[in-house]
Amino acid sequence: MKDIFVLGIETSCDETAVSIVKNGTEIVSNVVSSQIESHKRFGGVVPEIASRHHVEQVTFVLQEALDQAEMTMEDVDCIAVTEGPGLVGALLIGVNAAKALAFAHNKPLVGVHHIAGHIYANRLIHEMTFPLLSLVVSGGHTELVLMKGHGEFEVIGETRDDAAGEAYDKVARTLGLPYPGGPHIDRLAHEGEPVIDLPRAWLEEGSYDFSFSGLKSSVINTLHNAKQKGNEIKPEDLAASFQASVIDVLVTKAKKAVEEYGVGQLLLAGGVAANKGLRETLESMFDSHACELIIPPLSLCTDNAAMIAAAGTILFEQGKRGGLDMNANPGLDL
Ligand code: KG4
Ligand code: ZN
């Protein structure tokens, strides 16, 4: 059978990324240009700055991805692009780049959901067998997704307020740590002890939904009260306690869902999947379990285009096609 080469483009937030993936499973090239330095001094992503960076970077990143693969556009079978969700101005740059390439080189085009991409990052390291569950934890999403086949996504639980990554970033800001705060809290948490009592939002019995805003407020209040009373709180202990609460809820709900749905695989996905504490806890919990745990390497957890190309390959194989009227869709459903 002929090999399929899909070129992926991702510009939904603050990474401009292009990648070429072979047969949906093998990375041929993977280029990511991060804008984090430009957003850091604002303490978060500034949408207008993000769009401008994408415009400046996208053609260079595309050329670099083709050069690294030693390919030209003629060797590419399909172009896959993140259609949503994300920042509309940022998404538009990728979508328009993809449409221009598809038109100029007469190639098929597919639009990919960003979260489908995060989940399919796992297929770049391991075969996916169904039914499976994916725990998606990113800056914008916290979801438990049940998959009974390729391209079939059923969200069985999601956050009702802040996403896990968002809570990490807000708590980090409160502790005076730079953006994005997740990795800093993770590092700090390993230097402290989870001795501060913080809440865990289990929600109603049987619910797989999440809520992190109460926990975030609790961290802020704990710091505030300690300051007022002149008590000293070790930031590393607060980070460790916050991280323990997040991980406890994520892992307990994931484990329960794995048992209830009888899945053979649990896939971790999204930027917070880079979290050392979460990875270690899941590994120790699923070690003796009938369910296989798959965790992508750090470079495939945070935003990249290889995951978009991997998810796009499935759509291409299923005959799905996007037209030249494709638009960025910041509220796209999975
Ligand atoms: O998936 P991603 O790159 O972008 C979105 O689609 O949102 O996720 C970014 C998020 C940020 O909130 C960042 O703080 C968080 O992932 N993150 C982490 C870690 N590394 C990145 N959170 C906790 N621990 C980490 N080690
Ligand atoms: Zn993402």
Image (cartoon, rainbow, N blue to C red):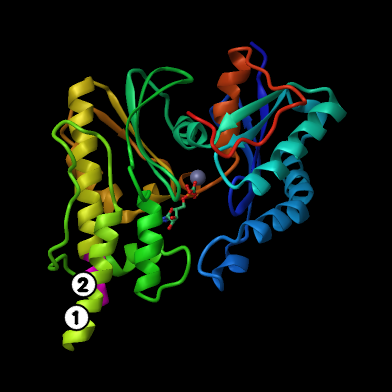
Q: Circle 2 sits in a helix, a strand or a loop, which is it?
A: helix
Cα distance, mark 2 to mark 1? 6 Å
Report x, y in % for residue 85.
55, 39
Report x, y in % for residue 263.
26, 22
Where on the picture, by quarter, is residue 311?
A: top right
Residue beneath the point at 42% across and 30% down: 126
Under mark 1, the amino acid is Ala
Quick check: is 54 in the magenta stretch? no
Left or right of 22? Residue 131 is: left
Quick check: is 237 in the magenta stretch? yes
Where on the picture, by quarter, is residue 306?
A: top right
Residue beneath the point at 38% across and 63% down: 170
Relative to 317, say whether 179 is above or below: below
Report x, y in % for residue 53.
71, 57
How would you rate the neighbour count of disc 2 (Cα within 10 Å): few for under 14, some for 14-19, many for 20 or more? some
The reply to whether the residue tagged 2 has its Cβ within 8 angstroms of ligand 1 is no
Look at mark 2 in the image and give the residue it sits on. 222
Look at mark 1 in the image and give the residue it sits on. 226
What residue range appears in magenta?
235-240
- Asked whether the residues under the numbered discs 2 and 1 touch, taking CB atoms below 8 Å apart as contact, a structural biologist would say yes
Mark number for residue 159?
none
Relative to 74, say whether 321 is above or below: above
Left or right of 126? Residue 315 is: right
